[in-house]
Amino acid sequence: MAATQVPEFEHPKKAFGWAARDPSGHLSPFHFSRRETGDKDVAFKVLYCGICHSDLHMVKNEWGFSIYPMVPGHEVVGVVTQVGSKVQKYKIGDRVGVGCLVQSCRTCQDCNDNLENYCSSYTLTYGAKSSDGTITYGGYSDSMVVDEHFVVRIPNELPLDAAAPLLCAGITVYSPLRYFGLDKPGLHVGVVGLGGLGHMAIKFAKAFGAKVTVISTSPNKKQEAMQHLGADSFLISRDQDQMQAAKETLDGIIDTVSAVHSLVPLIGLLKSHGKLVMVGAPEKPLELPIIPLLMGRKLIAGSGIGGLKETQEMIDFAAEHNVKPDIEVIPIDYVNEAMERLIKADVKYRFVIDIGNTLKQSS
Ligand code: NAP
Ligand code: ZN
């Protein structure tokens, strides 16, 4: 069985990255292999890869379905090195990116609706079984080989390092802002949790013309959120007086929190018919209070990344409206420390690994 082969010899192309071997989540150098570039495949040299909190959940097996060894990374950008004979959209030298998905069935209703992210048989960029039976490895590595359908173009206006977080953090907040109608000028949008996803939610909501209130556990993020990221107001979620004073002021909320937290105070911030959209993915279930929802016909929903068409649209929108993630670029050998800092919410606002300059076989 291919899946049980030694990763280094599974495929013809040598590849190198950093992998977690067990739920300690510790990452270290790892030799594996990539498939030959198929007719519809784009092969690219990875230059940068963002660190999503999902990578942290995954390397530690917090969601319970991790497969080891695991090379994380689903905010991957680089430059095309080879294209298959049937590739239409890309050529060698193009700037490209790959997000959370590398395959889907391409025939179901969701795929036909450009919602590959809701296809029940999609393949995640890492830690998943692909259609040939082998396990996928992500972007904390030197190269990728991906079907062109799952590749997006990075416009020249966007620097490659800052473009990386758009592939997951960006689309994950852009898609619900659009779908739930929170993209209209004059609306008042709340953003809970000021990390990678949260800071992108502020930027996109502001670009749509909304007023934005951040709801955070970190008082030290207030000044920067308002002066630099463009938030209009900032609430400390543990400060009951502040939360009370802001009751029933928000049209919608994007909740990006990665840990278990109470929803009651957030529902209280919504106006009647307000929408609380969950995008954070805590490892344990949250309590769902019903009565506060009934009082005002409020809605709680979820949203997961976005389809490929919308991901390209989001990146083009970001380029056009100068929406850029705030990043801390790190070398690959800082990755374990970066994960520790992510646990402590100590990030402004996305770590991006400089793969091109720092991933060396000797590291
Ligand atoms: P992140 O950068 O670590 O940000 C999460 C933020 O949540 C923290 O900065 C912190 O903000 C807040 N927070 C953390 N622990 C908290 C706690 N115990 N109580 C209240 N607030 C807390 O993470 P991220 O990369 O933005 O990802 C956020 C979540 O979204 C993760 O669970 C990730 O797996 C999930 N995710 C989902 C999708 C999707 O498709 N739906 C896609 C990508 C990621 P403050 O300091 O401001 O409180
Ligand atoms: Zn992610």
Image (tube, grey):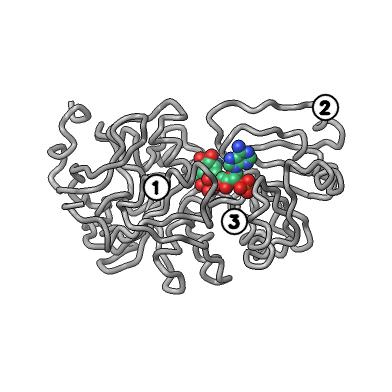
Q: Which residue is mark 1?
A: 337
Of badges 2 and 1, the one in the foreground is 1
Name the element at disc 1: helix
Quarter where residue 256 is shown? top right
Name the element at disc 2: helix
Q: Which residue is mark 2?
A: 291
Quarter where residue 126 is shown? top left
Q: Determine whether label 2 and label 1 are within 8 Å by CB.
A: no
Residue 81 in view, yes or no: yes
Callout 3 amino acid: His
Name the element at disc 3: helix
Callout 2 amino acid: Ile
Count of marks overlaid on the render: 3
| Left or right, residue 17 beside residue 284 | left
- Could you give the CA–CA distance between mark 2 and mark 1, rounded to whole angstroms? 43 Å
Query: Is the residue 18 above or below the residue 295 in the image?
Result: below
- Could you give the CA–CA distance between mark 1 and mark 3, rounded to whole angstroms? 21 Å
Callout 1 amino acid: Glu
Q: Which residue is mark 3?
A: 199
Residue 257 in view, yes or no: no
Measuring 48% from the left and 46% from the top, which residue is drawn there? 342
